[in-house]
Image (cartoon, rainbow, N blue to C red):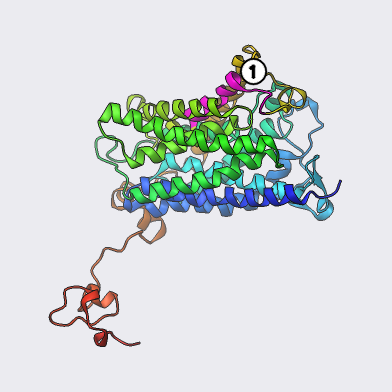
Amino acid sequence: MEIDTGNTAWLLVSSALVLLMTPGLALFYGGLNRSKGVLNMMMMSFSAIGLISVLWVIYGFTLAFGANDNTTVNHFIGSFTQYLGTETSFVGDIWGETGIPVYVFLAFQMMFAIITVALISGAASDRLKFAGWLLFAFGWFTLCYVPVAHWVWGGGWIGANLKALDFAGGTAVHINAGAAALGLAVVLGKRVGWPKESFKPHNVPFVMLGAGLLWFGWFGFNAGSELTVDSTTGAAFVNTQVATAAGVLGWIIVEWLRDGKPTLVGASSGAVAGLVAITPACGFIAPLPAVLLGLVAGAVSALAVSLKYKLGYDDSLDVVGVHFVAGWIGSLWIGLFATLQVNGAITDVLGANEGLFYGGGVTQLGRQFVGSAAVSVYSFVIAVVIAMVVKAIVGLRTSTESEVDGIDVAEHAESGYDLSPAAGGGGAFAQAGIAPSANSAAPDKAPVSEKVSG
C-alpha cells in the first residue's frame, strides 16, 4: 500500500498538537499550585516528555501495538520483538489500511503516553521527591500504561474481546491516570497543613492559558484518533468543541448556585472536564448528546472535587475529581448514545453495539462499565505497589522542612519568582539597567540620557 499523504500530514499535525498539550498541562497545573512549588509541578510534566519519549521508542510502542498472536495470555501484552527499538526493518511499513507510515503512528501514540503519565503528577504537588517521581513514572508507564494501551487499542482483551469502545483515551488515558493519581496520593499522604490551611492557586492567568492550550491541542488528540480525514473526523472535531464549551457552563452553573459567584479557575476546570468526558465518545456520538455530556461532566466534576475532603485523600489538583470522574462519565456515555449515524464502524469493524437510546440495549453500556472498572482497579493497585517500592528505595516524599519552605528550592535549587531586592544601590532601577535621577520614581520616568551603557 502506498503512503496516503493527506492522512499522514493530518496525523503529523495532530501529533504536534497533542505534544503541545503537555506544556499546556504544565501551565494549568503550575498556576493551580502554590508559588513556592510551581517549578517542581511544571518540571514533572516537562520531564515526562523526556522520559516517556525515550521509553516509548525503545520498548513502549512494540509492547502496546505490536501484533500479539499468543492467545494463551488473552491479549494482555503486545509483541516483544516486532518494533523493539524501532529498527529500520519497518521504516517503509504502513499502519493498517490508513496509508500512514508506522513511524508517524508511533509518534502520534507517543504523545498520548507522555501526557497520560504527566496527568498523574497533579495529585502529588508540593511533596513528591523529583527522583521519586521519575522512578514512579518509569514503573507506571512500563507496568500500567503500556499494557492498558494494548488492552484498549492494540488488539488486547478490552477492545478485541470485550468490545468496549474508547475513541481517543477515556479509559486508556484519563481513567487510567486518575486511578493512578489516587493510588499515589494515598501512599504519599497529605500535604503539611492540608486541609486546614489554604492552598489557593497562585496564578489564575496561568490556569486559563494552560486550559486554552489543552483545548487547542485536544483537537489533535480527538479528531486525529480517526487516523484519516472523513465524516467521523469532522464529528469528533465538532463534538470536542461543543462538549468542552458545555463543560465550562456546567461547572460555572454549579459554582454560581453553590457559592454565589462563578470563577475563572472553575471555568478553566470545567473546560478540562468537558475535554476529558468527550474523549472516549467523540467519534461515536452526535453533537447534541455531546453538549449534554459536557454539561453533565462539568457539573458532576465540580461537585466531585469535594470528595477528597470527605474521604480524606489529598489529591492536590483534583486529578481524581476531574479526569477519573469525567473519564468514567464519557466512557459510559458511549453505552447510551453511540450511533452508526456518526461512525459506521461501530458494528461491522469494531463488533460493538449502538447505545441504549439508539436501539442497542444495555449490552454496550455493560461492556463500557467492565472495561472502565478493570482499568480503574488495575491502575490503582499498580500505582500503590510502585509507590511503595519507590518509597523503600529512594524515598517518596520530601522532608517537612523542604515542603514548608518550598519544594522548588529543595529539589531544583531555583524558584519561579525572584522577589528578593536587587543588590547594591538603585533597587529596581539597577535591575533594569537604569540610573535613577533625584526626582524619578520609576524606571519609565528616567531621562534617556541617564541610561547606563554597556
Considering depth in this image, is 16 or 190 the residue closer to the camera?
Answer: 16
Magenta residues: mostly which secondary structure?
A: helix
The part of the chain drawn in magenta is 324-342
Who's the residue at 63% across and 16% down the image?
A: 358
Question: Would you identify the image quadrant in which residue 228 lies?
Answer: top right
Give the answer, above or below, for where 316 lies relative to 449: above
Who's the residue at 59% across and 15% down the image?
A: 357
* Number of marks in picture: 1
Question: Would you identify the image quadrant in which residue 353 lies?
Answer: top right
Mark 1 neighbour class, 10 Å CA radius: few under 14, some 14 to 19, many 20 or more? many
Q: Is residue 385 visible?
A: no
Give the answer, above or below, for where 239 lies relative to 390: above
Who's the residue at 29% across and 30% down the image?
A: 256
Give the answer, above or below, for where 231 lies relative to 393: above
* SS under mark 1: helix
Q: Is residue 313 shown left or right of residue 137?
A: left
**Residue assigned mark 1:** 364
